[in-house]
Amino acid sequence: MKPSEISAVILAAGYSSRMGFFKPLSMLDGRVALEWAVRSVTGAGIGDVVVVTGFRREETEICAVGAGARPIFNPRFSEGMFSSVQTGAASLSSSSRAFFLLPADIPTVRPATVRLLARYASFRGIAYPLFQGERGHPPLIGASFIPHILNYTGEGGLKRFLEMREKSAVDLAVADEGVLMDMDEPEDFEKMCLRAEKIHFPSPAERQVLFSIAGTPGEVVAHSAKVASVALRLAGALPLKAGVDRGLLENACLLHDICRTLPEHDEAGKIFLEVCGFQAVAAIASCHMDIPPRSAPEAKLLYLADKLVRGTALVPVAERKRSAMAKYGDNPNAGANIRKRFARARRIVRWIEKKAGKRIGDILGEENHSLDGSH
């Protein structure tokens, strides 16, 4: 199904009585929650986006239009959320074949998650995002259900309506904790603010789901954790002006081998992480096999740390090179590539030691171990 055949209904009509302030217009990392919610779907290519308004109608409508959505007022908003679901569903174009349903207080769903769900769009089906075995928002509801939504009495609300159509449902595992995160209580809002600040990086729980979806072996996960530890220690020795983003570095290291079981795993991992919505992490993680000229400091640190770690053990660059040459050196092309890669590693060693004013072995607590193989 084409994105042009899919709509989205965002619910922003309630009183937010439990929160103590109006949730759709609350500020998250520089923009209001409603704008975050709208961008979750427009960022995935969904063009027809409806925002259902009610309480504080005028302010909400202004925000909706500014975010690129069309507001629809629900005169029955005091009756509860399902009346807004009906208002939104009734407003959709006859050309819509399916629609996402997203409450404005669940604003940090990544566009990549919506894009993945859109692949499962069906006129007669329902698709749910699944995080760690739990269904979340937004469900993607086939347009064939719209007449039934409009005629439903509302008993049990949307949850009951969807439960009665379980045979039409499919689940999609996603690495997006945001599908479960709402803003019902003040402490929920605090968590949401923290998530909004780091939305471009996966949380620890999301990383575990990424490993599960990709089928990453445990020993590869352990290796990557050691690489991250080494890279962060190297980064800690560099001056602030080196401009290392430690969050980006850590995540790139932890995920650099996520598709290790696949051919050309660096490129496969890059594509996988991009599809899941982590473009910045993917760009750095993909550099661990072949680092480009004038690369970012995070890429340099990952590249070297990966060469310094075999399994979960620190080894000198020279030893890694000898091992690789013994295994692949009979092939002229492979041998040339190995020499090129380890020459780059030694250049990064010199860069770090110049910036830090220390030897690599001293930084890593390996005073008697020549980790760069040249001392």
Image: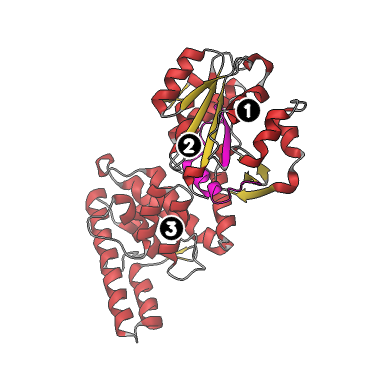
* Left or right: 79, with 267 as reference point: right
Q: Residues within 10 Å of mark 1 (few under 14, many from 20)?
A: many
Residue at x 57% of width, y 32% of height: 102
Q: Is residue 133 above or below residue 34?
A: below
Q: Residues within 10 Å of mark 2 (few under 14, many from 20)?
A: many
Q: Residue furthest bottom?
A: 330
In the rendered structure, which segment of residues is drawn in magenta? 98-125
Q: Nearer the viewer, residue 368 or 236?
A: 236
CA–CA distance between discs 3 and 1? 36 Å
Residue at x 36% of width, y 67% of height: 316
Q: Is residue 119 magenta?
A: yes
- Say which residue label 2 marks: 40
x then y, percent, for residue 324: 38, 77
Foreground disc of the pair 3, 2: 2
- Say which residue label 1 marks: 85
**Sequence-wise first label, 3 or 1:** 1
Q: Which amino acid type corresponds to the residue marked 3 in the rendered image? A: Ile
* Left or right: 354, with 256 as reference point: left
Q: Residues within 10 Å of mark 3 (few under 14, many from 20)?
A: some
Residue at x 67% of width, y 47% of height: 133
Q: Is residue 10 above or below residue 340?
A: above
Residue at x 62% of width, y 23% of height: 84
| Screen quadrant of the C terminus | bottom left
- Say which residue label 3 marks: 271
